[in-house]
Image: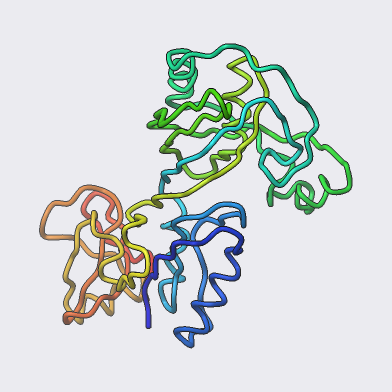
Amino acid sequence: MDGIVVIDKPLGSTSFNMVRDVRKKYNEKKVGHIGTLDPMASGVLPILVGKATKLSDLLMEHDKDYVATLQLGEKRDTGDQEGDVIETATIPTLSVSDIENVLNSFMGETFQIPPMYSALKVNGQKLYDLARKGEVVERKPRKIVITSITLLDFDSEKNEIKFKVTCSKGTYIRVLCEDIADKLNIVGFMSSLRRTRVGNFKIEDADKFIEMKDIFTDIPTIEISSNNMKKLINGVPLTLNESYEDGICNLISNNEYIGIGDINHNSLKRKIIL
């Protein structure tokens, strides 16, 4: 089978475990996932099966929705509940308005320094391997975009802030939680995280298998004759009879899904042929 199965990853399981389970279920060697979820996080994990693994680079660029809980009063070395407490602080009196103003300040394009406890590599070494040795290295700030951030709940007794955020690829919610706490003149860490969407794949799609032709539903579909498809596969660009916006498109030939094309000034080239 070729396509995507949307998993609602449970707490405690690794993304690799989910890939292993899908590989076994569908008896398919080529299996991968989009966007790793840590064991302490739950939610949407799209798993690519068979030929769909060729689409991973296109799908990695999608934005994501998360629901996170920020625990105030403690700072942890990992930025989440699995870490050791490295700092505590008295919590000031906070109002809902104070919190909403701080959340809104993160809207738009900004920069974020990746955490030491992450899989990013510096000089060939993963940051979390260095962090476990007690080493701290310089990390370059990376551009992120937050298109929506909303306060869901503030529990003043438990000192917890629950919020929903829509963000770009590469956004670390652990770091966002720490930055929010910092702007509130307090320390904090991410105590829970649930991902509810990755691109077009939502939590409501959990356990669904999405066929290749239905993965990219928001781009045009172009039907190509057998002769023109041979040309396209051999790298010959085609001039389109109809006018299309620049960007990617689905390719169909003889009622069969062929792959992804790239349109540039009404010239069509192959991008990913399955």
In the image, residue 171 above or below residue 26: above
- Left or right side of 32 for 200: left
Residue 224 percent coordinates (x, y)? 18, 73
| x 78%, y 34%: residue | 138
In the image, residue 221 above or below residue 255: above
Looking at the rendered image, the quarter that the C terminus falls into is bottom left
In the image, residue 188 above or below residue 264: above
| x 46%, y 49%: residue | 195
Instruction: In the displayed orientation, state which residue is furthest to the bottom.
Output: 27
Instruction: In the displayed orientation, state which residue is furthest to the left.
Output: 242
- Left or right side of 92 for 50: left
* Depth check, front residue: 199 or 72: 72
Residue 35 percent coordinates (x, y)? 52, 55
Q: Which image quadrant is residue 257 in?
A: bottom left
* Depth check, front residue: 115 or 233: 115
Looking at the rendered image, the quarter that the N terminus falls into is bottom left
* Depth check, front residue: 132 or 190: 190
Residue 209 percent coordinates (x, y)? 33, 73
Residue 87 percent coordinates (x, y)? 78, 27
| x 41%, y 72%: residue | 52
Q: How is the image coloured?
A: rainbow
Q: Number of labelled discs?
A: 0
- Left or right side of 193 for 147: left
